[in-house]
Amino acid sequence: MSLRLGIDTGGTYTDAVLVDGVTQTVVEKSKSLTTRHNLIEGITESIGKTLGERDPKAISLVCLSTTLATNAIVEGHGAKAALVLMGYRSSQLALANLDEASRDMPVIMIDGGHDAAGQENCPLDVKAVVDKIEALGSSISAVAISGMFSVRNPAHEVVLKEKLIQVTGLPVTCGHELSASLDAPRRALTALINARLIPLIKNLIVATRSTMNAHGIEAPLMVVRGDGTLVSSDFAEHSPVETILSGPAASVVGAQFLADRPNMLVSDVGGTTTDVALIKNGQPLLSSEGASVNGWRTMVEAVKIDTHGLGGDSEVLYDREQRDFTIGPHKVMPLCVLAARYPAVLTELKAFIEAPWTKTNMARFIVLQSDPGDAVRLTGQQRSLINEVKSHPQSMQSVFAERHFSLAMKRLIEMGVLTLAGFTPTDAAHVCGWQSDWSPEASVMGATLLSRYSKFNLGRSWPDATAFSESMLSKMSRQSALCLMTAMINDANGVFGKPLHARNRALLESMFASADTAKDESNNNDNWLGMSARLNVPVIGIGAPAQSFYPPITRFMDAEVVVPEHAEVANAIGAVVGVVRQSAQITISPVSGNKRVLVHAPQQQREFDGLEPGAEWAIEMATELAVNKATAAGGTGIDIRVDRQDNAVEEGGQVTFFESIIVVTATGRVA
């Protein structure tokens, strides 16, 4: 028997499945908690459970999907990277949200780069850049480089990258390596995100390889890209931005495999996010404009996915202005998980329950996720906060009683040193008996504290922890329905990744509340007006919490909701049924004043007497590039598709040529 092992490392769970390579059936599956402080633990446990007593030599391929890159962007995590911009104007930082993305990051702006024809603007001062990067010392972990029109001539990026690697040993990302499009600010954004993700994805790949070695698995390791296709682990390690939406893309492929329907709305609800995608005529919709996550639009082609900060581990917090609870977008460790790991937490929660007053921070805890050691440069306040929680988690109420650590805590969370724990929909499910994996006692006390806090602050009151938790689960289902409606509205408008307008969101929330047959979010059960929405495409719910949150949607939305068998490990299944696909793009532009054309190949530029000989050479070069990329990504048996788009205008019998774009796509099987 030839087996394929699929692994999905999400923000909450690490899933593993064994799929028979011949029959394409699931042989075994398992779930383990993702251990962010040491990824090897979660991966080892998940693979060990799935492999059991089977011969590891029977595994011919290992495929990995992950939400770590997506979650890092949503949560604002990632390594600190320097951004080197050549030939940019300072005003361009405001484009593509580049200024926001580079906030708290060192930005080095220098002369250099090339013009639209690929001609050098001015010589590059390599020494000046190297001196500035060296001055940053250990405060950065990677470097991103982006030059104006580097896709027309990448010479400056190439030279600077080679020198920085030689001098600093840091990983360096160049914009032209990730995209052939001209949008310089968005290309710089993509390069910066890639640089920040390199240490994160490298740790994941190293952890997976170590676990494979420990189990005696000698198969190739592949990683899922954001478009659902596969690349080699070496490729992913150097271009981690390609794995943005890797987990959601794998879930779309897995949902299609499990549901076997030509048209569907796929909703993957995980611990951190809810990811919604459309499959039409058997094919997931792709975004040629680039993956969009949390407002950042990159230049990496990916499945069209609406990503929302809503999951089983989203924090439930009281909004004092609205006098109501919100869910998400920030993820925390559920109280039930925290107490299962640190039983002493129960003692502190009991003390808060017995207190005559209630504060919201009583149900929130600070947890040390990874000890930074002495090598990392930290402020005195940051060190002090780490020492407070080093031995065991502490409630924010206790830690903040005498000193204010908000800024220090925020920065340490961004660095991945600390994480928070609090009440979540996962806790609500434990209170209501839908789940019993960890400590229901902690969840009940968390629900009691939050409902009491609401009552003391002129909000709604509930008779007990169960009623409060049922209310939060109902709110979670309605917010999940909003995610579905957002995707459908965006698709109808020809966009994706765009939040609903506040007025539309308020209307839908009101409609769902009026149509909800449970009526558990309103004290007024005399609603005489009920409005409902209908979806004409089935909803395929996948992910660990899907069985809890998606069937209740039918209370207030007319829709067919299907949670298929193996839905909880759909991402891992999707990882092992993909193909390898790589593209290369070359642009041809006219030479001013005559009929000659200039072909802008990545490593060289070449003039031709006319468009056709230029296009012929461009196709040859793009084919070679695409095949090499597909082979390097782990593909075999390569098939080629050539797309050519000429931009020309004919007027009065005279043809004016503006530009031609050649795209060659190479698709291959995984050996």
Image (cartoon, helix red, strand yellow):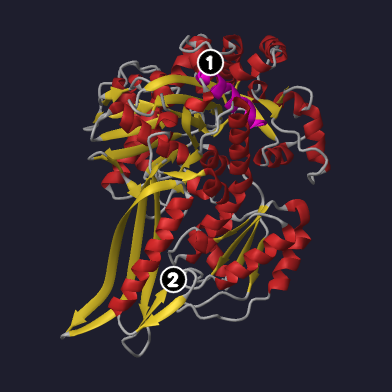
Q: Any magenta on residue 172?
A: no
Quarter of the C terminus within the rendering: top left
Q: Which residues are magenta?
A: 37-54
Q: Position of residue 488 (x, y in %)?
A: 29, 39
* Outermost residue to the left: 652
| Left or right: 519 in relation to 86 | left
Residue 290 tag number: none
Q: Taking 396 as reference, is 592 left or right?
A: left
Residue 224: x and y, percent? Answer: 46, 41
As helix, strand or loop, the secondary structure at mark 1 comes to loop
Q: Is residue 50 magenta?
A: yes
Q: Is residue 67 above or below residue 448?
A: below
Whether 417 is drawn above or below 599: the answer is above
Check disc 1: other Cα within 10 Å, few if <14, some if 14-19, many if 20+. Answer: few
- Residue type, label 1: Glu
Q: Is residue 671 above or below residue 557?
A: below
The residue identified by callout 2 is 601
Would you name the residue on which mark 1 appears? 53
Rendering quarter of residue 43: top right
